[in-house]
């Protein structure tokens, strides 16, 4: 029963009116809210509400203030909010600044648009729309967006571009020349589907997904000893096993949150909690993006200043779900006490409030809180097995939260779908991917709803979702110049350091896995899903002078540099180098330039080929997603 009361929904902000998101809500998020953030919320925001008026959410604006309503939907000229923005407004707002005519027009358009949303019938649930496949659904919803925004999609990618892209996304590396030639030479009607299924069943896929979700769940490790601890304590093995066996995502998350693995292959699941060394706030802040799709850090000291649905009580309630947990010495187990963990937090009004496990829906754990004069003793009868090394309480907050968060919680599916979409398409349907809150409306709300419902309907089948995305038309587009949130063309994005490390070794003719190269590249090159992609001087230095890159290009009998240098014809060396690195032959200009470079060093063929490989492997074409 307690587990059911923990159900985290937040449906009002995550599955809102599709029509509203299309018109008034889109105007609010894209234009009105940024305008109010700069000019209004200091006096009329979540922290201070002069005259009782709050202007940080549409609902708050519609509620009005001490003097009544300020917006009449569809009638800006009759709305006091719009009237007071005029130069002759009484009172004039903002009091010390004059909005431009363009800025006032934005507010007028928004108020006018609200009339349309107020009279539209509620949209039909997206579940009534059926499609043959996930790919069909994606292409239909995205194409509707193109039509509405009058955006023309880019052309479809050729086989080489698509093949290289899907290898990088699903295997974390480029294809070998042999793998590319096998795909290119296939005459099968469904050769792309066959390749995707083969990659999803490969060990490369399990490693790639482990690399991604290791970063998403625990963050990148900067020190070798920290990485070794994740390996030695079974965390990496647990993740790889989960993706290798296509374990339902909700089951994986449940094991991570409860941290009491029953099966030997799940022993590493407890490391998620253990690595944070009893820092319960850090645990709560890491859990929120997984189960809700949003960060709650900003609600530690007060209600979230911008995403008003996230309250301070939610932050401390999530902390309370884990504050009975304690690392066990001499292993990676995490115990849980049956008593204690009742604390208070102080809000901005200096009121002391109980920290109760309160989910974003406002529901709480049904647990009796002792009074100030009561003393609750810890005793053996409060545990399942009092003699066990890691005692399990008969009532576990952690387990109650985990059960609720991973069953009948639509946000769990939405969070995973959005993050996976961001990995494969370059940005989330909600962007940034871990800020799925009322401030960030989805670019395609119907699509996000449909994908999340389908993911849950198929028992959180990750391969089913991945397959659908990468076999869609949207995934196979070439680069375009349309708005990034229209997904009308492939977005330009650099390879993450993990992809680069494995791809460099493949291009050099070596096995893809090498811890030293990966650790070095992780320290210098792009993170997984950064909010912005910015090249740095450190990265340029690394690409020009890296001793680790020099090591993998060192001539040796088993390496591509040596094999290519042994070809008697310099033109053949150029062809072979381009195929090894780019999976394509050079064009005429590239061939002429590379051939001239090799011919200038006739007495140093190996060194010349090595330098050619280095130039190709640090080029923009290699460093970015095709």
Image (cartoon, grey):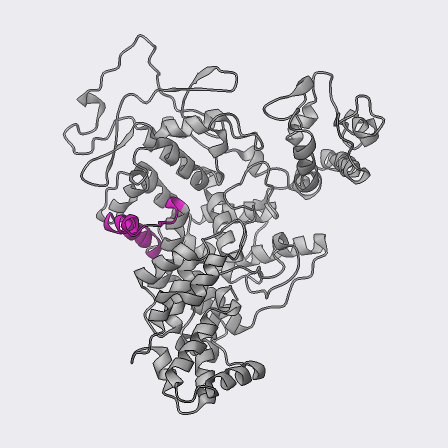
Position of residue 323 measured from the top left corner of the image (x, y, whole percent): 33, 28
Location of residue 78 by image quarter: top right
Task: Residue at 51% x, 25% y: name it.
Answer: 302
Magenta residues (range): 217-244
Q: Nearer the viewer, residue 279 or 68?
A: 279
Position of residue 354 measured from the top left corner of the image (x, y, whole percent): 41, 18
Q: Residue furthest right?
A: 88
Q: Is residue 581 visible?
A: yes
Q: Is residue 16 left or right of residue 176?
A: right
Q: Nearer the viewer, residue 279 or 311?
A: 279
Q: Is residue 1 above or below residue 264?
A: above
Q: Is residue 314 left or right of residue 325?
A: right
Name the dominant secondary structure of the magenta segment: helix
Location of residue 84 by image quarter: top right
Q: Residue furthest left?
A: 387
Residue 299 included in the magenta stretch of the image: no
Q: Is residue 206 visible?
A: no
Q: Is residue 69 left or right of residue 77?
A: left
Task: Residue at 64% x, 31% y: name it.
Answer: 57
Q: Residue furthest bottom?
A: 568
Q: Quadrant of the N terminus?
A: top left
Task: Residue at 34% x, 10% y: name it.
Answer: 371
Task: Residue at 26% x, 48% y: name it.
Answer: 229
Q: Is residue 192 above or below residue 40?
A: below
Q: Is residue 324 left or right of residue 50?
A: left
């Amino acid at each position: 029963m307690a587990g059911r009361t923990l159900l985290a929904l937040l449906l009002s902000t995550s599955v809102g009116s599709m029509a509203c998101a299309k018109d008034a809500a889109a105007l609010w998020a894209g234009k009105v809210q940024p305008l109010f953030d700069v000019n209004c919320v200091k006096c009329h925001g979540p922290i201070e509400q002069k005259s009782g008026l709050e202007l940080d959410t549409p609902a708050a604006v519609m509620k009005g203030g001490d003097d009544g309503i300020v917006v009449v939907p569809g009638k800006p000229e009759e709305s006091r909010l719009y009237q007071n923005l005029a130069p002759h407004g009484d009172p004039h707002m903002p009091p010390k600044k004059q909005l431009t005519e363009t800025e006032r027009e934005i507010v007028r358009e928004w108020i006018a648009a609200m009339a349309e949303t107020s009279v539209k019938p509620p949209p039909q649930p997206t579940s009534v729309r059926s499609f043959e496949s996930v790919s069909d659904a994606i292409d239909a919803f995205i194409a509707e967006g193109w039509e509405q925004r009058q955006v023309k999609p880019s052309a479809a990618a050729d086989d080489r571009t698509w093949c290289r892209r899907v290898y990088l996304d699903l295997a974390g590396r480029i294809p070998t020349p042999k793998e590319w030639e096998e795909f290119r030479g296939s005459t099968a009607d469904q050769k792309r589907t066959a390749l995707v299924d083969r990659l999803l069943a490969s060990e490369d896929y399990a490693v790639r997904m482990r690399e991604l979700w290791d970063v998403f769940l625990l963050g990148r490790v900067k020190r070798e000893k920290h990485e070794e601890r994740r390996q030695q304590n079974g965390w990496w093995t647990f993740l790889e096993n989960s993706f290798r066996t296509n374990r339902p995502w909700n089951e994986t998350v449940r094991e991570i949150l409860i941290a009491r693995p029953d099966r030997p292959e799940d022993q590493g699941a407890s490391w998620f909690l253990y690595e944070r060394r009893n820092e319960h706030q850090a645990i709560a802040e890491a859990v929120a993006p997984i189960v809700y799709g949003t960060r709650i850090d900003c609600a530690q000291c007060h209600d979230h200043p911008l995403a008003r649905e996230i309250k301070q009580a939610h932050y401390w309630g999530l902390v309370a779900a884990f504050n009975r947990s304690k690392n066990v010495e001499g292993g990676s187990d995490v115990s849980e006490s049956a008593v204690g963990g009742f604390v208070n937090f102080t809000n901005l009004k200096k009121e002391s409030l109980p920290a109760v496990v309160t989910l974003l829906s406002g529901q709480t754990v049904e647990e009796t809180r002792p009074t100030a004069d009561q003393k609750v003793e810890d005793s053996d009868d409060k545990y399942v097995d009092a003699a066990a090394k890691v005692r399990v309480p008969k009532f576990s907050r952690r387990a109650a939260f985990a059960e609720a968060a991973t069953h009948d919680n639509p946000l769990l599916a939405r969070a995973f779908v959005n993050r996976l979409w961001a990995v494969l398409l370059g940005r989330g349907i909600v962007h940034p991917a871990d800020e799925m809150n009322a401030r960030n409306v989805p670019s395609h709300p119907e699509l996000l709803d449909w994908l999340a419902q389908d993911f849950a309907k198929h028992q959180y089948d990750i391969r089913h979702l991945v397959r659908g995305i990468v076999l869609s038309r949207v995934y196979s587009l070439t680069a375009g110049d349309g708005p990034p949130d229209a997904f009308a063309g492939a977005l330009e994005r650099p390879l993450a350091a993990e992809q680069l490390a494995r791809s460099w070794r493949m291009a050099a003719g070596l096995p893809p896995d090498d811890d030293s190269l990966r650790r070095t590249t992780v320290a210098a090159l792009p993170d997984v899903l950064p909010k912005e992609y910015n090249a740095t001087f450190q990265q340029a230095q690394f690409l020009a002078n890296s001793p680790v890159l020099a090591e993998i290009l060192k001539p040796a009998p088993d390496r591509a540099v040596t094999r290519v240098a042994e070809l008697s014809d310099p033109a053949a060396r150029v062809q072979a180098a381009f195929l090894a690195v780019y999976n394509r032959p050079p064009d005429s200009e590239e061939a002429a330039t590379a051939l001239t470079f090799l011919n200038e060093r006739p007495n140093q063929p190996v060194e010349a080929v090595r330098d050619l490989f280095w130039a190709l492997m640090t080029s923009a074409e290699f460093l970015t997603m095709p």
